[in-house]
Amino acid sequence: MNAILLSLIQAVAVLLGITLLAAGLTFAERRLLGFWQDRLGPNRVGWQGTLQIVADMIKIFFKQDWTPPFADKIIFTAAPIIVLTTVVLAFAVIPLGPLAGIMPNLNIGLLFFLGMTSLSVYGVILAGWSSNSKFALLGGMRAAAQTISYEVFMGLAVVGVVMLTGSFNLETIVAAQTRVWFVIPQFFGFLPFLIAGIAEAHRLPFDLPEGENELGAGFHTEYSSMKFGMFFIAEYASIVLISSITVVLYFGGWHGPWLPPAVWFALKIGAFIAFFILLRAALPRPRYDQLMSYGWKLMLPLTIANLAITGALMLGGIE
Amino acid sequence: MSVTLSDAIAPPALKSCPPAAQPGQPVPPSPQATTDAIETIWCDADHLIHQMQYLKTDQTQNYRLLLDITAIDERQRTHRPHPNCADFTLLYHVLRPTDGRQLRVKIPLTQDALIAPTLCPVFPNANWYEREIWDMFGIRFAGHDNLRRILMPESWQGHPLRKDHYSRATERGPFVLPASTEQAEQHALRDIPALAGMIDDTDDDPETMIINLGPNHPSLHGVLRLVVKLRGEEIIDVVPEIGFHHRGAEKIGERQSWHSFIPYTDRIDYVAGVMNNFPYVMGVEQLAGITVPARAQMIRIMLAEIFRIISHLVFFGTMVQDVGQLSPVFYVFTDRERALELIEMICGFRMHPSFFRIGGVAADLPQGWDARVRAFLAYLPRRLDEYQSMVMRNRIFKARTIGIGEYSAAEALDWGVTGPGLRATGIAFDYRKIHPYSGYDQLAFDIPIAQRGDCYNRVQLRLDEMRESLRIIAQCLKQMPPGPVKSNHPLAMPMPREAVLHDIDTLIPHFLNATWGAVIPPGEVSSTIEATKGLNTYHLVSDGTTQPYRVRIRTPSFAHLQIIPAISRGAYLADLIAIIGSIDFVMADVDR
């Protein structure tokens, strides 16, 4: 009974933490972008603009929740829920520290994560489809093609780590990195994984499903109020998710000298989040077909070569 | 004021057209004397195609660029320029790219036969100009495949630039928009794809769809509507629809005094400020025979070049943002702010200073201007270097722009592309060099060119041109001559105060100038400059009154928009955005 209560409390804490973190991230991103772009960013509400999130939330809650009359109402409503739910569910398997996290020692933890990220694309496609708007449809189409292509080598990239540890259990994977972080032996697995992760989160330079310069807002063009808010929060939550899973798989999870594990974990995630935002400040957006050929013709062969070499080395008895 | 200046200028040599192929009574081309000494010949509608074909293709003529087609409603004109002149005149303006020489062909039309053959087979870019003339004057073009209104809505009654069409809102009843009319107008917008010939009954491919970009769209740089036919993301056809920003600047010109029209010109290409004053005041000065003092000319050049930088910066930032790079637009707007501060210091105004005056500029340079300009000259090159490495060397940016939206030099000339868009195809055509005006011949600068004519070249050229503009500004700084900034011509300046109070002969002109405005001698003049985006021409017709009889504004943006369909077919939707961004247009400049 106590165990159930404990995990329930943990689950609620993680859920709240992620939502708040994601909301906070919207503010952090705008301030960081402002810093990198020689401007201020939001700095009026509260101390240094910290209450901007509250103001945004008030705004987004009180906006008219408008469902276009031409949309398929049920799917239109379900789509943002699917996106947010799957992203949040995926956090269940992330080990946040030693013995912390909701279900970090799930024996199929990594597969669960991959499954959840795959499911979330349904939300995006359905949003684009059910909006019954041409811009949204194009966005949804792009999302489908992009996510499916990039998932292929995302899955293959992590196999390298699985081979080294012999486990899908994320806690085991973290534990295996006490000596050396997997980013060193698995650098060519890490690279495709991170790139695929950015694509999964639809962040620049892989934000083609939104592609605001061509498509207005892409798949969520027709969304407003809290339904849009859910997509928005889900995007930032998936930044946190991709950052944490990258840290878990390749950067030794919570491991680190001197500082407590939770601090290490937060620091590492923070660095990746900042990297995500820097990408947005720095890079232009490739074209749809360029993105696809980059994935299939460069990243996929790279991942497969990485797997082959890892396998060969293991057979040869090195590491 | 009754002596026309055109009398003083000897008529130019007659351009002999080879014998007409058609039977009938050929009217021999007949020359007209003009104030600006641009060769002007009168022809008739039957021989138009023949004449234009000759001018375009004959080796001795080689007028490859159709600069402009416009019309003049001559019915209320008292100073008829030529015996052939009838109720309406069609005016074809061509230019020879090799030496910048211009030529006008005029076609008289009578009120009961407002029709002329279309010029589209000879010059493809005649298409939109002819639509505009149909829209504005009600002149039909036989053989034109899509003669629709272009600036006004299809439902508009009358043809606005006719002299019998009202020009002020007070001349018509109060404006009302009942729900039924609003709905009808909105439905009319839906018919555009069909009217433009995008939908044919045989085409029932379920893979294709028609999507509207704009008039409200983040990447269209203003109120432009692009009707795009897509297969997947591949573009089958594009039809640009314009007119949402139409303010009737040409019509307004006919009711403003010569002087008070200057502020309207600022708002034609609203990112290029005084650059728009330039051709207008030069034209009026030519009509009135005013010589501008050297200092005023140099100030004009300096301000125009600062605005060229401002315009190119805005172009650069927005273009780069169109391909998804979010940061540079903020950097360039910081730079633009510095340039605007210079403008503000000199003119007291930022975006639309209206600083040029007939006969000079509004005021002398303020004290300490040189230090501020020098600081700007030191500041910008480093920033341009940064943009070069941040954007032009970025691999994703290259992948998005190299080889995209390519056109050849021949295509560019066919479509009337000028400015950096033409120079990107390898033709070193810069009006400042080829036909120096306002003292550009005293300044050393180069014409950056590129070869491929793609989006990347067009962006790169603008960066290079900013450096050349900086060079010009640096020379202005060094060579700024002393002296007055306004001509002492009675049409340009108020009469001297002492003289006004002492003799009636100065009091009367003073009174007239102050109450009516200057009376500009009758005549016709075309004044062309190398504006930020290409050639900007003002064709001014004076009937010897206080107002222009006709103001024709030929803008580069209008010409450049026409090439979009030709270079977008087969590209992807995202390429279309890059193409639009690289073309550099301002919708106010298109619609006027």
Image: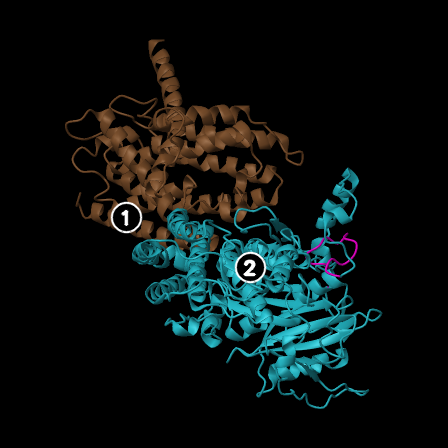
Chain colours: A brown, B cyan
Q: Measured along the vertical axis of the image, is residue B16 above or below residue A282?
A: below
Magenta segment main secondary structure: loop
Classify mark 1: residues with Cα within 10 Å, few (<14), some (14-19) or many (20+).
some
Q: Amino acid at mark 1?
A: Phe
Q: Range of the magenta residues?
A: B147-162
Q: Amino acid at mark 2?
A: Pro
Foreground of the two, A205 or B303: B303
Disc marking residue A188? 1
Return the chain for callout 2.
Answer: B
Q: Secondary structure at mark 2?
A: loop
Q: Name the spot of residue B49 as percent of width and height, x first.
A: 70, 79
Q: Quadrant of residue B161?
A: bottom right
Q: Residue furthest front?
A: B502
Q: Position of residue B305 (x, y in %)?
A: 42, 62
Q: Is residue B34 visible?
A: no
On screen, A21 above or below B12? above
Q: Mark 2, mark 1: which one is toward the viewer?
A: 2
Label placed on residue B544: none
Q: CA distance from mark 2 to mark 1?
A: 78 Å
Where's the C terminus of chain B, which quadrant?
bottom right
Residue B56 x, y percent position in the rendering: 61, 81
Query: Where is mark 2, residue-wise?
Result: B494
Task: Report the quarter where the N terminus of chain B lies.
Answer: bottom right
State yes or no: residue B549 in magenta.
Answer: no
As helix, strand or loop, the secondary structure at mark 1 comes to: helix
Question: What residue do we see at 52% from left, 32% from top?
Answer: A228
Residue B524 shows up from this direction? yes
Q: Residues within 10 Å of mark 2 (few under 14, many from 20)?
A: some
- Name the residue: 43% across, 71% down: B440
